[in-house]
Amino acid sequence: MRAFLSYGLKNDEMYWISLLADQLKKKKIDVFTPSFLNETSYHGNLASIYSCNLYIGLLTTSQELQRILFEFNNSIRKIPSLLVIESSLYKSILNRPEFKINPKMKEYIIPLNRDNIESSINLIQQKIDKIKSDIADKNLAWLIGGIALIGLFYLLNEDK
């Protein structure tokens, strides 16, 4: 199994990628990251994304917002996908027409509340509990990616 981790993180958060990759590798999942960052054309990463079984995007800065949303909007059509967005950033983009998020895709977006990481963990756990009995490809994102993200969030919560 292969997972594609894409990110738009602040410099002091780049270690999150290593933490999340470690969580996925414990589950015997190969991890791939973007080859093309800060590009004017975001299509360069799509072939790599489509060759994977899971897409996880992490977004805490608006610097990579367009690229991450482009990847997420395209990946979710072909492979199970999750997107973690800083809560304040998520609220700011919800009503902006240039950042169209299909309403059906919103259920695969996890707002990250830094002041209450436990709420993000609970959200993921609720989704996993809800679909545990339906092991289908569409639920792969929550069953594997969600569990890895819970591990990451617990580690981040310890850092506080």
Image (tube, rainbow, N blue to C red):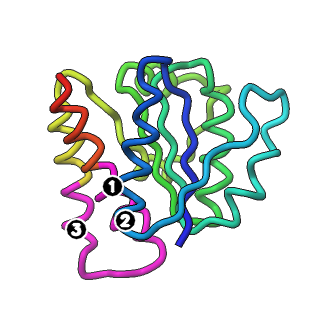
Which residue is labeled 2 in the image?
144
Report, in whole angstroms, how far the alpha carbon at label 1 lies from the one at label 3.
Answer: 17 Å
**Identity of the residue drawn at 20% across and 56% down:** 125
Q: Nearer the viewer, residue 59 or 87?
A: 59
Quadrant containing the C terminus in the rendered view? top left
Q: What is the three-letter code of the residue carrying label 3?
A: Lys
Q: Is residue 144 magenta?
A: yes
Is 61 drawn above or below residue 75 in the view shown?
Answer: above
Report, in whole angstroms, how far the alpha carbon at label 3 lies from the one at label 2.
Answer: 14 Å
Q: Is residue 79 magenta?
A: no
**Mark 3 near mark 2, Cβ–Cβ under 8 Å?**
no
Q: Nearer the viewer, residue 127 or 103?
A: 127
* Residue 106 on image: x %, y %: 44, 46
Write the start and end of the magenta stretch as one range.
125-149
Q: Main secondary structure of the magenta part?
A: helix
Q: What is the three-letter code of the residue carrying label 2?
A: Ile
What kind of element bears circle 3? helix
**Identity of the residue drawn at 24% across and 81% down:** 133
